[in-house]
Amino acid sequence: MSKKLFPILLITTLTSCSVNRVPIENRIFCFDTTVISQLYEGDQSNLDDIRDILLYYDRVSDNYNVREGITIRNISTSPIKVEQELYDLLKTSVDVSNLGATYFNPLCGSLSKKWKEALGKNELLSTDVINSELEKINNSSLIFDDDYIISKKGEAEIDLGGIVKGYSLDKIKEYLSNKHIEKYLINAGFSSILLGKKDTSDGYFTVKISDLDNAYIKLQNCFITTSSKSVQGVKIGDITYSHIINPLDGSAININDAVIVVSSLGYIGDALSTSMMMNTVDEIKEIEKKQNVKTVVVRNRQVIYCNEWLELYHG
């Protein structure tokens, strides 16, 4: 269920009325990508605090490597006390499936790893392996007790790749709001982006979707999250298999090529863009109404749906 890079480019020079203020910037590697933080207000201490937020959630959500302190790898059948931040992240990852993210499940870590390994060899998982992993998922759950005690029932592994970047951006937005910083851009590897206001007269960023014939949208004060199989997809025969796994049937086949979600909450956009890779357009429209998000859906390098409140420009 891990996220991937979709070719979205932020073009920050297309607005003519720029104040020409050079932002302070920090780049760090986390969540398997380079996260670029740009502030048009504030100082280096604010960038340092943003870095600490990113590195914290990168550490606690790592399900591949042994990291210092308590991480999701430490969650087992034996109850363990965790920090409130990790407790809240895990609780949110479970609750989000009730918000329309039907195809998001934080317990498909082992299945995702096996698909990644198989596709890396241009192979497919057998039906037996898929069914075995689905049985683990269906018979597993996270148990939340008082005082930040967590345990896991069953053998399924935790994977927060489809939510953790958006969740960490929510924490950064909250931090920046408390510091009264309004002009910023946090680019978490292009697949999860937090926009404040641009340092121009109108405050809008121009977000270009580079592989859709120079299509772009203008946004501010929101999250834009993308899921896609265009970069990490593997074509075997006539079918392109994705690293975004369907936790209901265990397949690596998505009906959409890319989904872009504009939202007011990063974790909602992150989880929904992942889940919507398996949703029909009609289902996506219903989710939009319930969650107050705006969506663009791409198939075969064509936009097959764009929310009426998102103006898609060309040129």
Image (cartoon, rainbow, N blue to C red):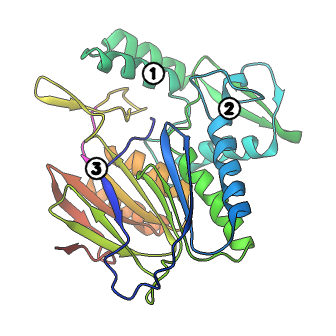
The residue beneath circle 1 is 113
Q: Is residue 73 visible?
A: yes
Secondary structure beneath label 3: strand
Mark 2 lies on residue:
142
Q: Give left or right: position of 107 versus 142.
A: left
Rendered location of residue 225, percent (x, y) = 43, 56
Instruction: Give me the disc on residue 258.
Output: 3
Dot 3 or dot 1: first in sequence order is: 1
Of marks 3 and 2, which one's residue comes earlier in the chain? 2
Which image quarter: residue 151? top right
Say which residue appears at 32% left-offset and 74% top-offset.
Answer: 310
- The answer to whether residue 100 shows anywhere in this view is no
Where in the figure is residue 162, as x and y percent of width and height?
A: 49, 42
Instruction: Relative to 45, say whether 123 is above or below.
Output: above
Label 3: how many residues lie within 10 Å, few (<14), some (14-19) or many (20+)? many
Q: CA distance from mark 3 to mark 2?
A: 30 Å
Q: Position of residue 49 (x, y in %)?
A: 72, 56
Q: Residues within 10 Å of mark 2 (few under 14, many from 20)?
A: many
In magenta, the rendered stretch is 253-258
Distance, label 3 to label 1, CA atoms, is: 21 Å
Name the quarter where the N terminus is drawn: top left
Amino acid under disc 2? Leu
Which residue is drawn at the image coordinates 37% and 63% (left, top)?
286
- Is residue 184 located in the magenta-colored stretch of the structure? no
Q: Is residue 269 above or below residue 195?
A: above
Q: Residues within 10 Å of mark 1 (few under 14, many from 20)?
A: some
